Amino acid sequence: MAAAGVGALASGSLDALAQAPQILTASAVKPLVISAANGNRSKDAEGMTCVARAYKMILEGADVLDAVIAGVNIVELDPEDTSVGYGGLPNADGVVQLDASVMHGPLKRAGGVACIEGVRTPSLVAKKVMEETDHHLLVGKGAQVFARNMGFKIEEDLLTEKSRKLWMEWKRRTDPQHYPDPKSRSEARMRERTKMAMEGLLDGDHVFGTINCNGINARGEICGVTTTSGLAFKIPGRVGDSPILGAGLYVDGKAGEAGSTGRGEANLFSLASFLIVESMRQGMAPKDAGMLALKRIAANTVEKRLLNSRGTPNFNVTFYVLNTRSEYAGVALYASRFALCGADGPQTLATEALYPGKPED
């Protein structure tokens, strides 16, 4: 198994793209890593992507949580990825505030940080919260002080030249100095953020930020991590689903794990990752459990401002699901992609979609 996996990684298949949804049914537990699509984009100094790095470490015997965190660190440290870590798009005031959570299946432990500033790798701080405290979540200035105490470098400004320019472009378009009224201002900011994505200035799949990465080893041990810079140009202090257990990430060592990207508020309202894992505990396959959660989100979306002319959500949510038998699924409200690495090497695959077309009219 290990030889086959390393051979696939060496075969140069880093950018393989599958055209159809992939659902695996394994007769035995096989090492596997699943993540958001940007988990097969950014590369480290050795040319390995997030999922490839995590998979390689799992084959070499590393703790699964250490492996998936090492994978997302590649994305967190990539200044070209505007959805996570260093280079992540800032809040409305131009300040980068990051969130992350980790869960360890075998140890039944978890940790998270929210609205932390000045640390490029919030996933590592979340792991320290899990290891060094009796808490699951630290936020804001307290999270930053904790990170400093744990030896992390605190930087005054995490904006890159690219993220700063995009923030200034958004401010220019929305012209907040006029403040016509709160509702109009909010609508203008959402409209211009969407336009910037449609024009290719922002990554349409990651306007809401985030990478989730889940892994399993040959012993069936599962762990997961979710890390994000959050909704682009969010209200300062806004926290989405990523650092919240049961929403942006949930891991149960006996059932499986699920994580998400997309509109955090919709996921928070449904605690969908918890729902997915509990559904798998009751015998559902990963794909069916994920689709159930998507239907729950759709049923809970009733505000007109959140619906398109078809009466379906005007936003996307994607789930990355893995059970303890190495069965997996990538599912979304609308067609999206996810990354995977197993014995065949790293791939970028199409999700199963609840609705056809795109969220916007």
Image (cartoon, grey):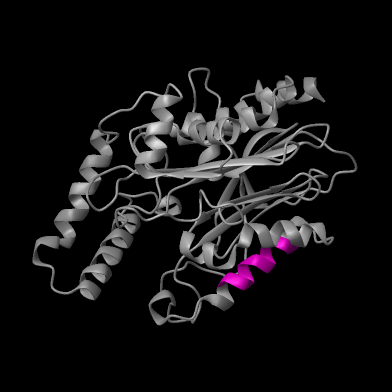
Instruction: Please provide the residue range marked out in magenta.
Output: 288-297
User: How many marks are shown on the rendered structure?
Assistant: 0
- At horizontal 23% and vertical 34% (from top left) the residue drawn is 161
Question: Is 292 within the magenta?
Answer: yes
Q: Residue furthest front?
A: 134
Q: Quadrant of residue 292?
A: bottom right
**316 and 260: which one is in front?**
260
Please state the horizontal and vertical placement of residue 327, each as a whole percent of the image.
78, 48
> Compared with residue 201, is residue 28 higher up or lower down, i.e. above or below?
above
Q: In which quarter of the image is residue 331?
A: bottom right
* Main secondary-structure element of the magenta-colored stretch: helix
**99 and 173: which one is in front?**
99
Q: In this view, does 126 lie to the left or right of 272?
A: left
Please state the horizontal and vertical placement of residue 204, each as a whole percent of the image.
41, 54
Please state the horizontal and vertical placement of residue 8, each as a whole percent of the image.
70, 26
> Compared with residue 184, is residue 231 higher up or lower down, i.e. above or below?
above
Q: Which residue lies furthest to the left in this view?
A: 178
Q: Residue furthest right?
A: 27
Please state the horizontal and vertical placement of residue 236, each as a whole percent of the image.
29, 53
- At horizontal 30% and vertical 57% (from top left) the residue drawn is 235
- At horizontal 82% and vertical 25% (from top left) the residue drawn is 1
Residue 329 shows in the view: yes
Q: Quadrant for the C terminus, please.
A: bottom left
Residue 102 shows in the view: no
- At horizontal 56% and vertical 27% (from top left) the residue drawn is 70
Question: Is 287 within the magenta?
Answer: no
Q: In which quarter of the image is residue 17?
A: top right
